[in-house]
Image: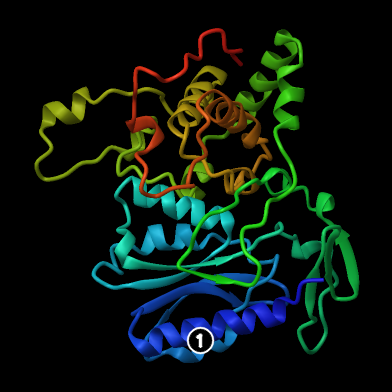
Amino acid sequence: MRDYAAESRQLRELLRDLLASGAADAAIAWVRGDPLRTRVALVERGREELLDRVVWSPFCAPSTATFLKRSRRGLEGRRVAIALKDCDLAALNVMIQENLIKRESVVTIGLRCDGLADPELFPVPEGAVEPVSSDAEGVVAGGRRVGWSEFGYATCDTCSYKHMQPDHAIGEYAREKRGGWAHVSALRALPRSERRERFSDMFERCIRCYACREVCPVCSCLECAIDPGERMVTPRTTPLEKTTAPQWACRERAVSENAVYLMTRAMHMAGRCVRCGWCERSCPVGIPLMEILDMVNHAVATIYKYEPGRDPSSPPFLASYAESDPSDEGGDPL
């Protein structure tokens, strides 16, 4: 059984040392909120008292990479130590590849993640915080055991990241995980008419709230090409540019318009999606968005042998081309 209390102590000690030595000017990590719940916080030098609340466990679902993305302007010129579970580290690597974050501005701390847990499935602790532990079967907290499959986080079940190299690691790091692409194979095995009907139902349910875009750690465009409400307007934008900017999809809640938004976003995420699953978990109408994204992710992985976020020094997938690239001719469309 993993001892998350011990790993949390190691994380706190490491962050304290990095701040005290000047190796980092600030730190980003999870802190304990309500029982079993966590939030991401910025710990600045001179305010180290917040370090006493830093914690690591399967309940650390919020993305530290997304927090860094949203805070990057305020942290410009400062070196930040950041605690990262596997999908967070992969997302950070994508941001480094795309020059959104400078590699020398961050100190990466990797924590092996065996999967995320839903605090709603555990009894509310009374008094002292209950110890949290896990093994290959599931998570134990508050005297109750819940299996990994019961949390319904499909992306955690199929996560396969390994051998990434953070600057520091807590405990046994980056072991190979369970899972694969069986869910995509099952989807591709459906008759085309049934598959089309399945995706049409997803498109119809979308309310275009854009929560999936906002919560994504690697969705970082200053101007969203498929949201007419996100046009970049500056003092230098001419009236002609404002009126002639292309509009790929209107805000009308129609199947065709929703399909343009969701499918264009899926194509834009090719080679960038780190399969953290936050888009799906944040969807207010429960659309299984990872089914759409994983059709693209599977093609990128099997045809081009590319895994997003593995190597921050390599060129971005969509920004690299070679005549020796394999052909996707004959691929199975949605």
Residue 234, given in percent of the width and then of the height, sits at 16, 44
Seen at 42% across and 83% down, the residue is 18
Type of amino acid under label 1: Leu
Please say if 167 is above or below 91: below
Q: Pick the quarter of the image with the C terminus.
A: top right
Please say if 177 is above or below 105: above
Circle 1: element type: helix
121 relative to 33 in the view: left or right: right
Seen at 74% across and 60% down, the residue is 117
Q: Quadrant of residue 11?
A: bottom right
Front position in the image: 263 or 308: 308
104 relative to 70 in the view: left or right: left
140 relative to 49 in the view: left or right: right
Seen at 31% across and 52% down, the residue is 100
Q: Residues within 10 Å of mark 1 (few under 14, many from 20)?
A: some
Front position in the image: 154 or 271: 271
Colour convention: rainbow
Residue 95, given in percent of the width and then of the height, sits at 38, 50
Q: How many marks?
A: 1
Residue 207, given in percent of the width and then of the height, sits at 57, 34
Pointer 1 residue:
50
93 relative to 139 in the view: left or right: left
Q: Quadrant of residue 144?
A: bottom right
Residue 54, given in percent of the width and then of the height, sits at 57, 80
Seen at 33% across and 32% down, the residue is 319
Q: Pick the quarter of the image with the N terminus.
A: bottom right
Q: Quadrant of residue 242?
A: top left
